[in-house]
Amino acid sequence: MTETLAPALDPDTGRPRLSRLADDDLELLLLIRHFELKLLQLYGRGELNGTTHTCLGQEYVPVALRPLLGAADFVFSNHRGHGHYLARFGDAPGLLAEIMGREGAVCGGVGGSQHIHRDRYLSTGVQGESLPVAAGVAMHLRRTEPGALACVYIGDGTWGEGAVYEALNLAALWRLPLLIVVENNGIAQSTPTAAQMAGTVAGRAAAFGVDHHLVVSGDVNEIRTGLEPLVARVREGRPLVAEFVTHRLGPHSKGDDTRPPEVIRAAEENDWYARYAQDHPEHFHRFDGPVRALVEGVADDVAARPPSRWSPCA
């Protein structure tokens, strides 16, 4: 029998130390982090219009899933989806151009921060909208492309939408290759989850006979190892709800943070960014500065581009 060694504990916090990442995983995590920070900076300077919802603190979720999803799989994102897009394509210039409405934008600058369509990736700002669509796509994939799946990201607040349960019902009945990733950051816009959702995500999935997998770790390697066999089962027609207990570092959008200080402090203490810098300082600092500079260069380049001239009538 092979013995599995427990992760070393941090002597100061008592938490398990994060395992060392592959270079490409660390680069991607840092790309998403510095991209989101740059967006907030640009909004603060009045260089962006509209709104934005950053995934600061949650970047590790799509990074952990990245190699488990193939080009034939569909990914459905939500209003807090920049990390999902970057984990899929790594295309910071195209995404920033879309948000800024500049030439080279992914969707001609008409989708903005929330509504993106590229290949088999779609995002929407309408809560719950993507799940029934993903279920329909999963049914199509089951019939025409066996082995492919539809992955949909939702939050804990979306469990107040009836479309979630309609999709779960059909996914279970028809054995759809549907992977539902729940980023449970404990708050739905400005309402704590405990104040707006009875029961649990696990209990609601169980009511439909859908498998549930709870992820409480922020360790990319550990998460990926645990999910790999479960995602393989999804491809065989066994739908899965993968619930990540995560933390949102920033406000709901740009400045509407109603959380008490102790909740924000807990999110900061659990942030993978600071933890990885402490656990693997040499590796972290080898990439953090260059990736930060890369994002700065992307921002300068995109800001210098002319406005997008895309038109549906062109």
Image: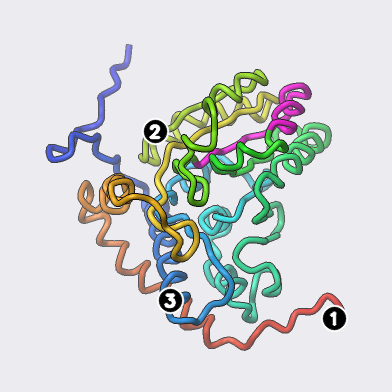
Q: Tell me which label, 2 or 3, sits earlier in the chain.
A: 3
Can residue 229 be seen at all in this image of the molecule?
A: no
Residue 167 located left or right of residue 7 = right
Query: Residue 131's image quarter?
Result: top right
* Percent position of residue 280, x then y: 23, 49
Residue type at mark 1?
Ala
Judge whether 2 appears above or below 18 on screen: above
Q: Tell me which label, 1 or 3, sits earlier in the chain.
A: 3
The tag on residue 216 is 2
The span from disc 1 to disc 3 (Cα, nearest Å) is 34 Å
Residue type at mark 2?
Val
Judge whether 141 appears above or below 101 on screen: above
Residue situated in front as seen by the camera: 252 or 41: 252
* Screen quadrant of the C terminus: bottom right
Q: Which residues are magenta?
A: 165-183
Residue type at mark 3?
Gly
